[in-house]
Amino acid sequence: MAFDVTRKEKLAALSFLDLPLIDLHIHMGASVAPHVMWSIAHQQGLRLPVRDYWEFLDLITVSENKVHSVEDYLGILHKWTEKIQSSPAAIERCTYEIISKEYRGANVTSIELRFNPMKRNLGGERDLDHIIHAALRGMDQAVLEYGCRAGLIFCMAREFSYELNEIIVDKAIRYHERGVVGIDLAGPETDPIERDPVALERYASLLDRARAAGLGVTIHTGETEQTGPEGVAAAVRRLRPQRIGHGIQAARSPETMKILREEGVVLEICPSSNVWCRTIDGFEGVRETLQRFVEASVPFTINTDGTYLLRTDLMNEFRLLHEHGILRPEQMNECVRRARAASFLA
Ligand SMILES: [Zn+2]
């Protein structure tokens, strides 16, 4: 009964929201419940640097004294969650748990779950196809049980070589018919390809191949000052993504916002992630950024980025925007409608 009350209370607080919701930007490495990760780590016999579950919880979720930047955030992913998820059994369970939990906990009935399969194969020790098939099995199971819609997005890594990223795109194309719906570029924005014309050209032709095969293209860019609004503009012009992960730096440039509006590129905004990673100055910064996008008619959506790592879910993101008076109810519902229209799910 307690669960039921919580759900009702949650729904009542956001009664203006047109449910169900859709999450376009959620990472595998940041969205599995800690108790599930704990269980998987034990099943695999992994030695963990903690004495008990509570220390583990602290290890794999954000906290004030641990996360001050995107690099700190990615560090948690890289050091622990990716390692724990690096087996077919682990990735199958993680995929299943995320999709089903977002349905039960946040009324998310459509979800595009992203991850980098090459960060789940222990540097080639595990077979990539086994990892991908396992993720598809986990997704199928959740979709069958809950009747929701789901697809996978494969993330290339900024820190990977072009050759490794090409393999990821080839795998995404190969598994498109099975449920891989898009391709992404993620990772730290240090030394961004947006500022390297040669790299930009190579990635542009790689993404053309992905597009021609029917995959959606989204790019993490403009999350930090390292890419800046110029990087966002360069990514839009050369890489031609339908969507951009974050892109908040664009708010600093009327010119970049104009490009986004004219090209109809949809931003995947993840408020809590930006606040925790300090790429934005608290919820006041979220307000200022979204206000500029509203004024410049830049299309944006609201997403989680990572639920458990960031201690949030999609309903909570809307609740935060509501409580801080950042968006009006009709603007939030417009975000949900826009996310449906911009989805890569067939
Ligand atoms: Zn992200």
Image (tube, grey):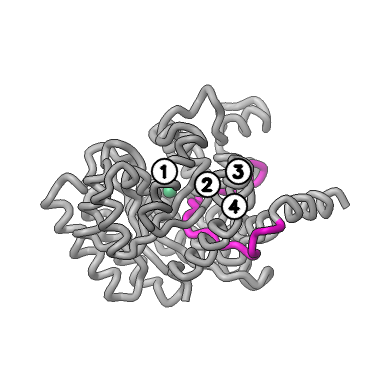
Give the class, few, some or many, for how many residues have Cα within 10 Å of label 4's Cα (few <14, many ≥20).
many
The residue tagged 3 is 320
The residue tagged 1 is 289
* Distance (Cα) linking label 2 and label 3: 15 Å
Q: Are marks 2 and 1 in contact (CB under 8 Å)?
A: no
| Residue 204, image x, y percentages | 20, 61
What type is the residue that disc 4 sits on? Answer: Leu
Q: Are marks 2 and 3 in contact (CB under 8 Å)?
A: no
The residue tagged 4 is 314
Magenta span has 17?
Answer: yes
- Is the shortest distance between ligand 1 and the CB of mark 2 under 8 Å? yes
Q: Secondary structure at mark 3?
A: helix
Farthest left residue?
198
Whichever of callouts 2 and 1 sits on the residue coming sooner in the sequence is 1
Q: Secondary structure at mark 4?
A: helix
Whichever of callouts 4 and 1 sits on the residue coming sooner in the sequence is 1
In the image, residue 323 sits, relative to residue 23, either above or below, namely above
Give the class, few, some or many, for how many residues have Cα within 10 Å of label 3's Cα (few <14, many ≥20).
some
Instruction: For marks 3 and 4, give the one nearer the viewer.
Output: 3
- In the rendered structure, which segment of residues is drawn in magenta? 15-36
* Distance (Cα) linking label 4 and label 1: 19 Å
Residue found at x 85% / y 48%: 2
Q: Secondary structure at mark 2?
A: loop
| Residue 317, image x, y percentages | 58, 47
Q: Is residue 43 visible?
A: no
